[in-house]
Image (cartoon, rainbow, N blue to C red):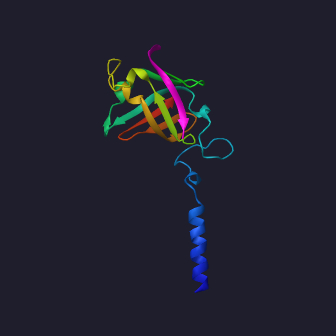
Amino acid sequence: MIYRLILVLLVSVSFFSCGEDSFPLTGTTPSPGGDPALSDSGYVEGNWVVRQFVDEEEDETASFNGIVLAFEPDGAFKMLRSSDLIATGTWNLENNGRELNIETPAFENEDESLGEDLYEIHDSWQLSEISDDEMHLIGEDEFFVLVRQ
């Protein structure tokens, strides 16, 4: 009987000592030092193109043909089409680097005057996977796969 009590106590302590931050993101390339947190914005900074965009199970990647998403070190966000600036905003990482927020005022009202579906980037995204050359962003009914340019 005492062994069962000790076993239950050990299992309980082990279970409750694991916090939410104890589990790395699946498929994530951890930052230097082995920490699965992605709070180092250097992983995101740079120019990215959309390899795939799916919205409500529909592939809408074609809407982003010729589009470059530029994440500047100072938190500025730029969307370019054929090197022409079409939208600006800001970006930042939250939730220990697991959430990427992209704010573009031109797209706040789901305005498609600059291009169909481009407003979709204006959102808060779960950063589910990132490496030196690929980044996966997941939203409620959509996801992006970005590749470094």
92 part of magenta stretch:
yes
Which percent across, then down, holds residue 100? 50, 35
- Which quadrant, please, contains the N terminus? bottom right
User: Relative to 63, is 52 above or below?
Assistant: below
23 part of magenta stretch:
no
First to last magenta residue range: 79-94
Which percent across, then down, holds residue 57? 31, 40
Which percent across, then down, holds residue 21? 57, 51
The single residue placed furthest to the bottom in the displayed view is: 1
Q: In this view of the protein, can residue 79 be seen by the observer?
A: no
**Quadrant location of residue 46?**
top right
User: Which residue: 32% across, 23% down?
Assistant: 116
Q: Left or right? Give the position of 61 relative to 78.
A: left
Q: In this view of the protein, can residue 63 be seen by the observer?
A: yes
Which percent across, then down, holds residue 59? 33, 34
**Mostly what secondary structure, the magenta segment?**
strand
User: Which residue: 42% across, 22% down?
Assistant: 105
Residue 145 or residue 38, whichever sits in front:
38
- The number of callouts visible is 0
The single residue placed furthest to the right in the displayed view is: 33
Q: Left or right? Give the position of 2 relative to 148.
A: right
Residue 97 or residue 146, whichever sits in front:
97
User: Which residue: 48% across, 22% down?
Assistant: 89
